[in-house]
Image (cartoon, rainbow, N blue to C red):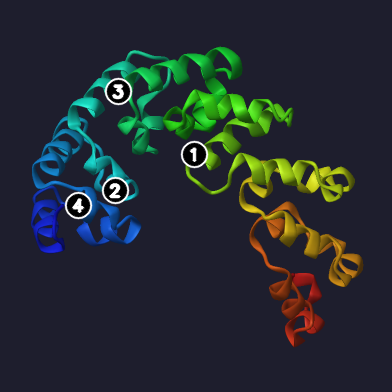
Amino acid sequence: MINEYTLKMLCEKYQVSSAKLVNKNNNILDKGEYLEIDKTLDYLVNELKISSAKIEKCPSILYYNVNVIKTNVKFLKSTNLPFTYVEKCLHILSAEPEELKKVYEYVLKKYGLRALKKTTSILACPQSIIEDVEKLNINVNNVLSLATSINFNYTNIEEIKKLIKSEEYKLHPELFTSETLSRANIEEIKGMINSEEYKSHPELFTSQTLAHAKIDEIKGMINSEEYKSHPELF
């Protein structure tokens, strides 16, 4: 555990914003220890030359054992995955080394290097989650992004099953991208697709709408003076 003042003093040593770290993930205060954070920052900043902006986007990396991080860095630098992709999602370096290696080899063999570059965060995901998603028999292009979303607790396998078994999915499969499947709730989607607004303005209901919007927000928008005056903007 570390308090905000001590974290601030430590971060200033490495020119990293403690405020951005805490705002992004305040678990760092409960899980972080001064010596471990110091060792990790020293390694990331002084040895790997990782920018402060990339560290600030991934506070969780700072409360893991630096030796685990070094082991994962050594392995990943020996692979065909350019390290610039790792720098964009540093949380993968906190994965258990043997599991990370196993997942890397599994994904590389089954999906290829291009998929690893596109969804590098998958390396922090247990192989068992990937296999659970594969069993759903969905579009292969959605497997890794959905497994990553489950690993981040954005959704779960049961919620995805409900979505792909629904009548809405059967009638409008084009709306169910990986983002929709990982972010949406089946009851909310039913409410949207069965609404009068959908019947009147189906063009407004894209996969992005289903993933992020609420039916009440859409109703408010369609009934607004702004929409009536400038529908082409919506």
- Residue that carries the numbered disc 3 in the rendered image: 72
Query: Element at badge 2?
Result: helix
Q: CA distance from mark 2 to mark 3?
A: 17 Å
Looking at the image, residue 187 sits to the left or right of residue 127; the answer is right
Q: Nearer the viewer, mark 1 or mark 3?
A: 1
Which residue type carries mark 3?
Asn
Residue 51: image location, x then y, percent? 26, 43
Badge 2 density bin: few <14, some 14–19, many ≥20, Cα 10 Å = many
Is 42 displayed left or right of 134 in the figure? left
**Comparing marks 3 and 4, which lies closer to the viewer?**
3
Q: Rounded to the nearest whole Å, what is the CA distance between mark 3 and mark 4?
A: 23 Å
Q: Is residue 14 above or below residue 102?
A: below
Residue denoted by label 2: 59
Q: Earlier in the sequence, mark 4 or mark 2?
A: 4
Q: Which residue is mark 1?
A: 151
Q: Amino acid at mark 1?
A: Asn
Q: Amino acid at mark 2?
A: Pro
As helix, strand or loop, the secondary structure at mark 4 comes to loop
| Tag 4: amino acid | Val
x then y, percent, for residue 167: 87, 48
Q: Residues within 10 Å of mark 4 (few under 14, many from 20)?
A: many
Label 1 residue SS: helix
Task: Pick whichever of labels 2 and 3 is earlier in the sequence.
Answer: 2
> Which of the two discs, 1 and 3, labels the residue nearer the N terminus?
3
Q: Quadrant of the C terminus?
A: bottom right
Out of 14 and 3, give the one closest to the viewer.
Answer: 3
What's the CA distance linking mark 4 and mark 1? Answer: 27 Å
Alpha-carbon span between mark 1 and mark 3? 19 Å
